Image (tube, rainbow, N blue to C red):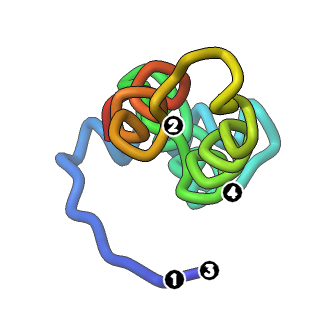
Amino acid sequence: MIRTQVQLREEQSVTLRELAAKRNLSMAELMRVAVDRFLQAEGYRPRIQRWERAREVFGRYSQGNGANVSEEHDAYLTEVYGEW
């Protein structure tokens, strides 16, 4: 893990401490959960998941189906993998 420092407003700090105690979590763990949920809501995928999705495309398109993979590989990757 990477240690970081975040400045909170007093009411945020009090509320987070109360919620963390209620859930029997540390304040740091509660904040990690919140960051994960925010990233998920924003559609972020960790780099490893993006690489795994890209690897799923390998070999999916063959020359036999009329696809020109050598010229259109970016379009095929975008179709399956999505925009970066």
For marks 3 and 2, give the CA distance. 16 Å
Residue 41 shows in this picture: yes
Q: Secondary structure at mark 3?
A: loop
N-term mark: 1 or 4: 1
**Residue at 51% over, 37% down:** 34
Numbered badge on residue 1: 3
Q: Nearer the viewer, mark 4 or mark 3?
A: 3
For marks 1 and 4, give the CA distance. 16 Å
**Residue at 54% over, 23% down:** 80
Q: Secondary structure at mark 1?
A: loop
N-term mark: 4 or 3: 3
- Identified by mark 1, the residue type is Ile
* Quadrant location, the N terminus: bottom right
- Identified by mark 2, the residue type is Ala
Residue 15 shows in this picture: no
For marks 1 and 2, give the CA distance. 16 Å
Q: Nearer the viewer, residue 29 or 21?
A: 29
**Residue at 58% over, 54% down:** 27
Q: Which residue is mark 4?
A: 26
Up/down of 34 relative to 52, above or below = above
- Identified by mark 3, the residue type is Met
Q: Nearer the viewer, mark 1 or mark 4?
A: 1
- Identified by mark 4, the residue type is Ser
Q: Which residue is mark 2?
A: 34
Residue 74 in the image, given as x and y percentages of width and height: 35, 39
Q: Residues within 10 Å of mark 2 (few under 14, many from 20)?
A: few
Q: Is residue 55 left or right of residue 73?
A: right
N-term mark: 1 or 2: 1
Numbered badge on residue 2: 1
